[in-house]
Amino acid sequence: MTADTPGQGSPDTAGTIEILRDLMTRAEMAHGVYETEVLKGVRDEEWPQWYAEHMTRALAESGYQISRKQD
């Protein structure tokens, strides 16, 4: 599997895919509320930063953290 060919991958990545898909879905919904209520309907040009911060907090709150694999 490459970055250009999404799929289920190996069994050990299936859980990661599920976690990230859930985080992205929740971030999308929360960001929609943020744009509507806080930004008053203005498109957030800094949305990648907002998503990264939101998803990092959500991961930490669930007991996860992203770390580089040590070889």
Image: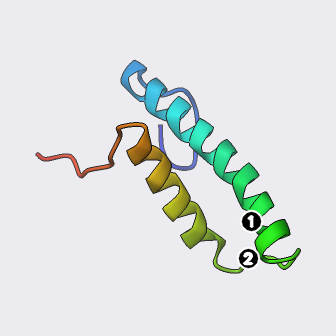
Q: CA distance from mark 2 to mark 1?
A: 9 Å
Above or below, comparing residue 25 to residue 18 in the picture: below
Q: Quadrant of residue 41?
A: bottom right
Disc 2 crowd rating (10 Å Cα; few below 14, some 14-19, many 20+) is some
Above or below, comparing residue 42 to residue 27 in the picture: below
Count numbered badges in the picture: 2
Secondary-structure class at tag 1:
helix
Which quarter of the figure is the C terminus placed in?
Answer: top left
With 22 as the anchor, is 17 left or right in this view?
A: left
Q: Are marks 2 and 1 in contact (CB under 8 Å)?
A: yes
What colouring style does the render use?
rainbow
Q: Which residue is at 45% across, 55% downward?
A: 56
With 11 as the anchor, is 36 left or right in this view?
A: right
Q: Amino acid at mark 2?
A: Asp
Disc 1 crowd rating (10 Å Cα; few below 14, some 14-19, many 20+) is some
Determine which residue is flagged by label 1: 34
- Residue 37 position in % (x across, y down): 82, 68
Q: Quadrant of residue 18?
A: top right
Q: Which mark is residue 44?
A: 2
Query: Which residue appears farthest toward the front when viewing the image?
Result: 37
